[in-house]
Image (cartoon, rainbow, N blue to C red):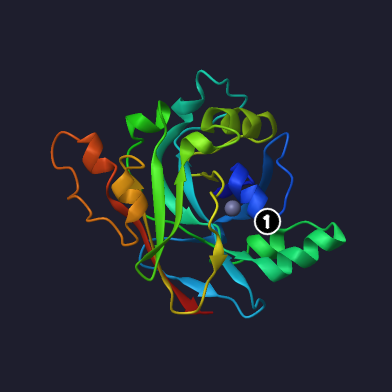
């Protein structure tokens, strides 16, 4: 299993790191050993003093897929969740300065904690969905997939020009603005939201999670569940 990750896929995030807006998707990858499943926590590794969180919508690939077209791209996705692309920002700065690859800053053991998977909400294919991340109970990131520079089908088309996606592969689709430092002991929770409601914008605290849909799936219940809940531990 491989995690493919997209860099700078939201204009506001590219700006906050003083990066130019890319003309094509920026792609890097993390190995299977980077993934941490719900309940496993994630490490603050000893080789960085500037660990950052980036909260991202994560796609799970459900079939072997190559050379997808925009119209069939969604068929390759069988579930979604939210995850953190944990980044050793100081190590990354050094890599960038030297023009070296990012892997040691991005792809280390435990750098990709993910939440539990849910079905692809219909709204994600049409208008997009909002998501928010909370650090120790306070909102730190709020994004909407409609603000992606390269929408999900375009990302899948681009990736499969180069790579055969395999069942179980993950695609981290980039982070909105609001990334910031992590401390050991921090707890991160992330939710899909039904909309960027004025309420959601004002509230600093996590929403009340709706119960998991029982029986016929309710789109709204799907869109107000906590997917990610991870604690960062001294690694
Ligand atoms: Zn990222």
Say left or right for 232 vs 101: left
Say which of 186 and 207 sits in front: 207
Horizontal side, residue 103 vs residue 222: left or right: right
User: Whole-percent x and y of residue 82?
Assistant: 42, 51
What residue is shown at x 72% (from left), y 69% (from top)? Answer: 91
Which residue appears at 34% of the width and 54% of the height? Answer: 202
Q: Quadrant location of residue 180?
A: bottom right
Horizontal and vertical percent for residue 80? 40, 42
Please say if 225 is above or below 77.
below
Q: Would you call the spot at circle 1 few (<14 residues within 10 Å), some (14-19), or many (20 or more)?
A: few
Which residue is most to the right? 98
Using the image, determine if residue 103 lies above or below residue 214.
below
The residue located at (19%, 48%) in the rendering is: 212
Is 2 rendered above or below residue 124? below
Q: Position of residue 88 (x, y in %)?
A: 65, 68
* Residue 44 at least partly seen: yes
Task: Name the residue carrying label 1.
Answer: 17
As helix, strand or loop, the secondary structure at mark 1 comes to loop
Viewport quadrant of the C terminus: bottom right
Residue 116 appearing in the image: no
For image coordinates 71% across by 34% down, the residue present is 24
The quarter of the displayed image where residue 33 is located: bottom right
Image location of residue 177, percent across then percent down: 55, 52
């Amino acid at each position: 299993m491989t995690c493919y990750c997209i860099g700078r896929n939201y204009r506001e995030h590219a700006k906050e790191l003083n990066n130019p807006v890319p003309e094509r998707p920026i792609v890097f990858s993390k190995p299977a050993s980077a993934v941490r499943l719900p309940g496993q926590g994630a490490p603050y590794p000893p080789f960085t003093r500037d660990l950052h969180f980036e909260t991202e919508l994560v796609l799970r690939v459900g079939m072997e897929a190559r050379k997808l077209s925009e119209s069939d791209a969604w068929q390759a996705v069988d579930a979604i969740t939210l995850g953190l692309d944990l980044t050793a920002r100081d190590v990354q700065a050094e890599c960038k300065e030297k023009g070296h690859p990012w892997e040691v800053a991005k792809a280390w053991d435990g750098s990709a904690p993910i939440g539990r998977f849910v079905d692809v909400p219909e709204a994600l294919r049409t208008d997009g969905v909002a998501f928010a991340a909370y650090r120790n109970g306070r909102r730190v990131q709020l994004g909407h997939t409609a603000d992606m520079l390269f929408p999900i089908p375009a990302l899948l088309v681009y990736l499969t020009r180069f790579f055969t996606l395999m069942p179980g592969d993950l695609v981290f689709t980039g982070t909105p603005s609001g990334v910031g430092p992590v401390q050991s002991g921090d707890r991160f929770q992330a939710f899909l939201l039904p909309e960027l409601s004025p309420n959601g914008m004002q509230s600093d605290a996590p929403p009340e999670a709706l119960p998991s849909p029982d029986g016929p799936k309710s789109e709204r219940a799907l869109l107000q569940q906590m997917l990610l809940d991870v604690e960062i531990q001294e690694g």
